[in-house]
Image: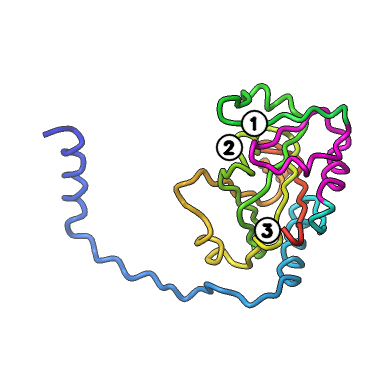
């Protein structure tokens, strides 16, 4: 008998007289009837409460707002599948660095960049949670976690109210990144510290028509 078989055998033996688990009630809401404007209003409220910057814009305004948000950046990293027209208005002095398979930036190189720009897969208005799933326009997890400033472009069409509405839009085997405001934690004296586990600054562009 292998060690694995022995361990599993002991677990089965210990659980032999365990009571049958009760069926989990599934009475929570699985859909909502909120309008697009109501979803935007709820999401903006949550994002502002989390101390994220947020603007509601039209598709054509993306380059203008990206340039305004990143006007003080020295370099910007972006996933290789991002629409590069969104970066067209960045000042010439801002280095634009694509992170792509075969030419991925190291953690040290990411740490030296000023900001990252990504899109997103789905956003939950009720909790103010933006979810990235590693698609080419969102990139691998590291690029949205290491740079100090994350500018995230959220299509209004991808906003849902509830978590159960979001889950069918996700492939749970993909590397998911769930973002609810800038990275922050509190010490034992409840002193808020930002940027510990990810970007210190989160700016969100909610884009109509995208």
Q: Which residue is mark 3?
A: 128
> Disc 1, disc 2: CB below 8 Å?
yes
Residue located at (64% from left, 31% from top):
99
Local secondary structure at mark 3: loop
Depth check, mark 2 against mark 3: the one in front is: 2
Q: Nearer the viewer, residue 195 or 92?
A: 92
Taking the spot 76% from the left edge, 57% from the top edge, the residue there is: 207
> Badge 3: few (under 14), some or many (20 or more) residues near its Cα, within 10 Å?
many
Disc 1 or 2, which lies upstream in sequence?
Answer: 1
Disc 1/disc 3 C-alpha distance (Å):
27 Å
Q: Which residues are magenta?
A: 62-91
Indicate the quadrant containing the N terminus: top left, top right, bottom left or bottom right. Answer: top left
Q: Is residue 9 left or right of residue 68?
A: left
Q: Position of residue 9 (x, y in %)?
A: 16, 44
Which residue bears the numbered disc 1? 99
* Pointer 2 residue: 140
Q: Residue at x 47, y 76 (%)?
A: 27
154 and 63: which one is in front?
A: 63
Judging from the image, what secondary structure is the residue with disc 1 in?
strand
In whole angstroms, how far apart are the C-alphas of marks 1 and 2?
9 Å
């Amino acid at each position: 008998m292998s060690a694995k078989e022995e361990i599993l055998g002991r677990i089965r033996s210990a659980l032999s007289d365990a009571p049958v688990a009760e069926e989990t009630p599934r009475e929570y809401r699985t859909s909502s009837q909120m309008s697009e404007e109501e979803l935007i209003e709820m999401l903006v409220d949550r994002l502002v409460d989390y101390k994220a910057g947020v603007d509601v814009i039209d598709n054509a305004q993306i380059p203008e707002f990206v340039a305004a948000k990143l006007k003080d950046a020295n370099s910007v990293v972006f996933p290789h599948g991002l629409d590069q027209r969104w970066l067209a208005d960045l000042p010439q002095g801002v280095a634009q660095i694509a992170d792509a398979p075969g030419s991925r930036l190291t953690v040290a190189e990411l740490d030296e960049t000023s900001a990252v720009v990504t899109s997103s897969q789905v956003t939950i208005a009720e909790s103010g949670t933006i979810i990235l799933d590693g698609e080419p326009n969102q990139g691998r997890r590291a690029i949205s976690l290491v740079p100090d400033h994350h500018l995230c472009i959220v299509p209004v069409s991808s906003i849902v109210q509830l978590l159960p509405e979001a889950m069918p839009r996700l492939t749970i085997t993909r590397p998911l990144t769930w973002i609810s405001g800038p990275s922050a934690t509190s010490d034992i004296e409840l002193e808020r510290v930002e940027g510990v586990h990810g970007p210190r600054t989160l700016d969100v562009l909610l884009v109509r028509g995208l």
